[in-house]
């Protein structure tokens, strides 16, 4: 039975291997581009949700921030609370009904759907990452005269990026798998190739077995590379402690009253001793 399975897989790959590789390439491009755009959306939304305002601020600023937070909350809840396959159907088939807008390029709508979906998840991750930064760092930044933009850019966001890197990696791996739902609008990803090949050769399980192995390889490779990146961002695990203070003069260079060099250097200013 296994011999027949691997024989069928070999014959399918020999005939459609190039098509499978094209599907893998499309999947990786879509997942990578959409994850990057989704991270940008998530950082933008996460930062907007954490801009502080107080009683002394102008009412227009408070009203605008409250409105933005309400819009972001609605966006996050809608795109986290509905399946991505239905989001793709709504945007691709629903936009012509409501707004008269039709998409001619499948790539455009696929990247749009996956990016917006990823951005909704990343918005909450970024907000949580910013709030996890110790409040003392915000106070310290204000104490040295930094405004909110400078504090976020130079102090908070670099730490936030390092803290949420596992979540970014997790979203990327999810996108590698979940881009398979884009076949519903005709996107030719890895899963769509499986549907096409299995329908052509009438060997569904061998093609599905090949598909599962391909997805497993992609996710394991992504996990390995992301762990390497996390270690790179975390820095060295061992640190060499500095045992000497560079601001303190080296022992033996101090000169005190009563020492020979001190007396020689200052004999012109000492006068007669009683």
Image (tube, rainbow, N blue to C red):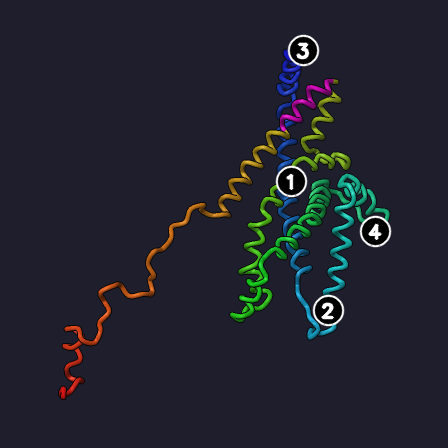
Numbered circle sitting on residue 247: none
Q: CA distance from mark 1 to mark 3?
A: 35 Å
Q: Residue tagged by mark 2? A: 62
Q: Nearer the viewer, residue 3 or 127?
A: 127
Q: Residue tagged by mark 1? A: 31
At label 1, counting other C-alpha atoms closer than 10 Å, the crowd grade (few under 14, some 14-19, many 20 or more) is: many
Direction from residue 181 to residue 145 in the image, left or right: left
Direction from residue 193 to residue 86 in the image, left or right: right
- Residue at the spot x=62%, y=45% of the render? 167
Q: Residue tagged by mark 4? A: 99
Residue 242, how many percent across, how many down?
Answer: 36, 55
The disc, 2 or 1, on the residue closer to the chain's N-terminal end is 1
Q: Quadrant of the C terminus?
A: bottom left
Q: Secondary structure at mark 2?
A: helix
Residue 182, how many percent across, how many down?
Answer: 73, 37
Helix, strand or loop for the magenta stretch, by majority: helix
Residue 98 covered by magenta stretch: no
The label nearer to you, 4 versus 1, is 1
Q: Nearer the viewer, residue 247 or 111?
A: 247
Q: Secondary structure at mark 3?
A: loop
Q: Are marks 4 and 1 in contact (CB under 8 Å)?
A: no
Q: Which residues are magenta?
A: 203-214
Q: Residue tagged by mark 3? A: 1
Q: Are marks 2 and 1 in contact (CB under 8 Å)?
A: no
The label nearer to you, 4 versus 3, is 3
Residue 8, how many percent across, how many down?
Answer: 66, 15
Q: Are marks 4 and 3 in contact (CB under 8 Å)?
A: no
Above or below — where is 2 with respect to 17? above
Q: Nearer the viewer, residue 116 or 26?
A: 116
Q: Residue furthest right?
A: 97
């Amino acid at each position: 039975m296994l011999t027949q399975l691997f024989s069928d897989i070999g014959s399918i790959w020999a005939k459609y291997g190039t098509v499978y590789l094209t599907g893998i390439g499309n999947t990786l491009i879509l997942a990578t581009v959409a994850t990057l755009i989704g991270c940008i959306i998530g950082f933008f939304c996460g930062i907007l949700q954490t801009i502080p305002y107080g009683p002394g601020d102008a009412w227009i600023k408070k009203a605008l921030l409250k409105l933005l937070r309400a819009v972001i909350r609605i966006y996050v809840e809608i795109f986290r609370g509905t399946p991505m396959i239905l989001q793709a159907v709504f945007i691709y088939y629903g936009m012509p009904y409501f707004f008269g807008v039709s998409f001619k390029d499948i790539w455009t709508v696929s990247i749009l759907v996956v990016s917006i979906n990823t951005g909704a998840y990343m918005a909450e991750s970024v907000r949580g990452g910013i709030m996890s930064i110790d409040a003392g760092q915000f106070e310290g930044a204000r104490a040295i005269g930094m405004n909110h933009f400078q504090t976020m850019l130079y102090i908070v966001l670099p730490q936030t990026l390092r803290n949420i890197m596992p979540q970014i990696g997790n979203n990327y791996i999810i996108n590698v798998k979940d881009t398979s739902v884009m076949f519903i609008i005709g996107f030719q990803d890895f899963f769509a190739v499986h549907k096409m090949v299995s329908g052509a050769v009438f060997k569904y399980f061998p093609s599905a077995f090949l598909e599962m192995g391909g997805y497993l390889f992609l996710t394991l490779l992504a996990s390995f590379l992301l762990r390497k990146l996390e270690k790179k961002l975390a820095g060295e695990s061992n640190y060499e402690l500095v045992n000497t203070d560079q601001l303190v003069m080296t022992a033996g260079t101090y000169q005190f009253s009563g020492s020979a060099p001190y007396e020689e250097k200052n004999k012109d200013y000492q006068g007669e001793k009683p």
